[in-house]
Amino acid sequence: RLRPVGVGDVEVHDAFWQPRLDRNREQTIPAQHEQCETTGALTNFRRAAGHTPGEPFHGMYYSDSDVYKWAEAASWSLASTDDRAVAERLAEVIRLFEAAQDGEGYLNTYFSVDRVAERWTDLVVRHEMYCIGHLTQAAVAHFRATGSRALLDVAERACGHIEARFAPGDVPGTCGHPCLEMALVELYRATGDERWLRLAVWQLDSRGMGVLNGSEYLLDHARLRDQSFVTGHAVRALYLYAAAADVVLETGDEELSAVVDRLWADLSRHKTAVTGGVGARWDGEAFGDAYELPDRAYNETCAAIAHIFLAWRLLLRTGDGAYRDAVETALYNGVLPGLSQSGTEFFYQNPLADEGRHRRSPWFTCACCPPNIARLLASLPGYVYTTSDEGLWVQLYVGNSARVRLPDGSSVGVELSCGLPWEGTVQLRLTPVEAREFSVFLPVPAWAGEATVRVGEEVVTPERRSGYLVLTRTWQPGDEVRLDFTMPVRQIGTHPRVAAGHRRVAVTRGPLVYCVEQSDHADAAVADLRLAGEETWRPEFAADLLGGVVTLHTTGSALKVDEDEPLHRPYVPAEPLPTRPAEITAVPYYAWANREAGPMRVFLPLLP
Amino acid sequence: RLRPVGVGDVEVHDAFWQPRLDRNREQTIPAQHEQCETTGALTNFRRAAGHTPGEPFHGMYYSDSDVYKWAEAASWSLASTDDRAVAERLAEVIRLFEAAQDGEGYLNTYFSVDRVAERWTDLVVRHEMYCIGHLTQAAVAHFRATGSRALLDVAERACGHIEARFAPGDVPGTCGHPCLEMALVELYRATGDERWLRLAVWQLDSRGMGVLNGSEYLLDHARLRDQSFVTGHAVRALYLYAAAADVVLETGDEELSAVVDRLWADLSRHKTAVTGGVGARWDGEAFGDAYELPDRAYNETCAAIAHIFLAWRLLLRTGDGAYRDAVETALYNGVLPGLSQSGTEFFYQNPLADEGRHRRSPWFTCACCPPNIARLLASLPGYVYTTSDEGLWVQLYVGNSARVRLPDGSSVGVELSCGLPWEGTVQLRLTPVEAREFSVFLPVPAWAGEATVRVGEEVVTPERRSGYLVLTRTWQPGDEVRLDFTMPVRQIGTHPRVAAGHRRVAVTRGPLVYCVEQSDHADAAVADLRLAGEETWRPEFAADLLGGVVTLHTTGSALKVDEDEPLHRPYVPAEPLPTRPAEITAVPYYAWANREAGPMRVFLPLLP
């Protein structure tokens, strides 16, 4: 059982991540506050508070959650920096939440004024618990970041209202869109009040009782404990499974643990794109069948975030680096593409191929993804380390300085600098208060080539355990560890049951999945590019491109295509397709669609 | 310019089609009447007629169109047979239509009672013109089948109401869902009244004026005359283009003709599945980008029908066999799969691969497809022949006896028998009233191998023109023509720009596309089947299987799959996938999902 290290304990100093976190705080969070204002989502709270008589409700019935996610993002950002502007805006928003909540603790602006009688009449569609889930997550973030109970009190009243209305063991209650379950476990962690854990368990156990019409799409087709395959709306499914993993962390429930393992196995073996994107289907934003991993995948940004939530919880339970790798893959390649270079435009869907019509937007009618990205980035420092009884675990190679409390109560200063995601160099400087024996766990990702470890000047060969190097010794203040990976470019194939993967490869280097964009290929349509599968790729750092990226270069082939050939025609085995050599440039997938619109491909077909 | 030969002039006697047309009349049409009763679609007319005070409206705002399509199917079936039960039901339904229409000619049961003020306030969504389009198509069918003007009068009043409300040259009017445009041209053909042709042209020319908010999805992004690529909702797009082709047929408008040619080129070169299915995307039931032809295509049954409508009109304009081939392909492989063997269950979507969860339903909330299939099948005799100034054209090889009036006014009896789709044998016996010179055009489909033609006992080598054999001679009563095709099994590849077609083939024989179903493969998962691309396939008639089908057999390979292998892993060029020989059986795609549920594939991957 690993334990997280709080957002506020880790200060990011990283060539790749720090500009992104700064942009999140300086551009994204203010722009999203403005969107909440423009769309009326904030006005809905003023209306519910009675400040704007006669005002109609604005937006979707779940628009409260946009504001709550914004508040969570703002809260986490306050854990890292003392940004007055953000703090003041947040304080004002929290006052609105307080004012909009009624005396019974009920809070949902859609039902606050003219739909009071409709409260709790439609758990299937109306997202009332979902919104309180996001309120609660914001409240826990705010409490952890600032120590203030202001928002936590609002959340506890709201959860108390739900506890009274859907009493554990008595009245089944669970929402068409999970979220509250995870939030309740967090609320329990923040407050120590077991009521919230009990309510979380009850919400999970209410699945399969028909509260949601037995819908498979809504994960109500069976008791959660009997669910055996990943299905339905991707974000909802993963929020639910992540909550189950949370409960397992807190209770050690072995039955539930086996369920989560089973679902993770289905997810990771059958239903995860090479980018960590999940939820293949546009219809219903849903998981597809096993091995259904098409180019034009839906891969909602929120689903990649949910994927991280689930993998992180399984990592905390097991210390298995495979979960850590999943967090890292989804972060770089499932979530980051959702954000423009400017920090103010977003993808909802993240397909693996496009013809140039899929572009980012500043906001959406259903605006779940933008503030979800903002809150994840703001909380990123919380994913850098964990601890265990054995010592300190690095989880993400993100440059930072931190002060970590070890389980024995001692505290250790950590300075980490690294060249990721471009170079496989990691330096770690440890400053325990005094000499102390513990283990340091350094992940060896699946993408890493040769790893060389030095402690001080000495090359060491530490134990390897489930994807980590384990360095156990008595650490002196100022001890330094240096880790160097090679980062070979890999051509990644897919399980042969994946129809869309047949004779195609994706190109990766380090934690990054790459793609080819038309912008870099003046002489060939990207649809015509082909690989032999034996190419050597040359990495090259392009400081001025896409904010500074390592591009990958090789000589492959381009088909000589006759556009007038019939679409369907007899296959002639002996007739190789005519090709010519073509210079191919790949850029990180997270950076696509930041230049002129044009075709993009993650997978390239193999000749013949 | 070809001219159609009416449904009532052709009596189908065909081992393949006659049971289907009988089942359509005996099972499908009555079952669909029952569905219109059960869903309340018929009650909506009683309510509009004032027969059921206090009754609410039932179903979707376009549910009238279900009943109109049923009425069209019933009407066409009366052209072929004298079915008392159908005739009586239809007469009763027509009386309901009459009673539901108001004094101004307005007819839409959604707006008839309590939404009178909302009439014509939402052309984008509400389908009022669309419904009248289906009414009008039913009316023309009824008039042609029975000679009765009863329904035609209702339709003319309704179209007159629209003409008054959206006056040509004055008030732009066009519907979010095209249909009325085609129907108006048919109404013009049936009545000779040029008002209807003018109104049709005006509706087409109203595109791009912003009536539909300039939406590309609704084909309002440009003047129709400036539209250059196939886009948007597939059924809507093709109904619109078919109407444009209708106008071209009647007016010879060359500008519009070039538009339709351009759109057809985009459709046939970039956006048509091997089955003739069209509209790749589940989101929005829409066309994808060029070459976007995934396994899990939407391929709505209605869109394949619309594809036939468009191709047929282009065939009438040009006499080019490529359009005929498109009609035939879409009929056998795009429409027929939409219907169960029982005739009472339907597919809305027709994907090219499935894992066993996609099954037919007796009806849908949006029930467009079932009665669309019924009306197409009931009108099938009208697709068998055309005429031109040169003589008689066979268009579909469907056994029948017919009496066809040639353009010179003389009439000729025709008896056609054939072994299609299983054997490439066609016999034609011509009985002109007296000896007469004219040409007989016999299609040579793209799928045909060697063709041998005999007139009487004599082997002849007729002229070939655009996919037809042209036999020009003085025909004596009783002259016989015999045509024999070989029907090689073909492995069909796809244009190299189709990502999903990379190193995969579909198997076809004659007009039929085949698929593999798990039911026939006890020893291997269909996902693991592979071909070398050089297989010889053995056809075998299986009288007891799926209503009697030719199955295809070969020895291919099955991958030895390790299910526990990672989903994504480095590609190793030198490592061939381990395989073992596997007996493969293919069945016609139209017949899939009529046995126990299980995986299905149209495309099989090629080794390596």
Image: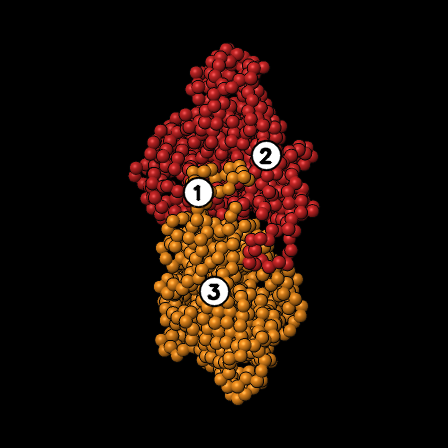
Chain colours: A red, B orange
Label 2 element class: strand
Subunit ID for the residue under disc 3: B
Disc 3 packing (10 Å; few <14; some 14–19; many ≥20): some
Q: CA distance from mark 3 to mark 1?
A: 34 Å
Q: Is residue B98 left or right of residue A255?
A: right
Q: Label 1, on which residue?
A: B561
Quadrant location of the N terminus of chain A in the rendered image: top left
Confirm whether residue B243 shows in the render.
Answer: no
Quarter assignment of residue B207: bottom right
**Marked residue nearer the N-terminal end (3 or 1):** 3
Which residue is identified by label 2? Answer: A489
Q: Amino acid at mark 3?
A: Tyr
> Is disc 3 placed on a helix, strand or loop?
helix
Question: Disc 1 vs disc 2: which is toward the camera?
Answer: 1
Task: Write the residue at 51% across / 80% down.
Answer: B456
Answer few, some or many: residues within 10 Å of disc 2's Cα (few below 14, many 20 plus, some between 14 and 19): many
Q: CA distance from mark 1 to mark 2?
A: 26 Å
Give the number of the disc on residue B332. Answer: 3
Residue kind at label 2, given as amino acid type: Val
Residue in view at x 35 percent, y 64 percent: B544
Closest to the camera, between mark 3 and mark 1, is 1
- Label 1 neighbour load within 10 Å: few <14, some 14-19, many 20+: some
Q: Quadrant of residue A339?
A: top right
Between A33 and A150, the residue placed more toward the observer is A33
Give the residue drawn at x 65%, y 39%: A554
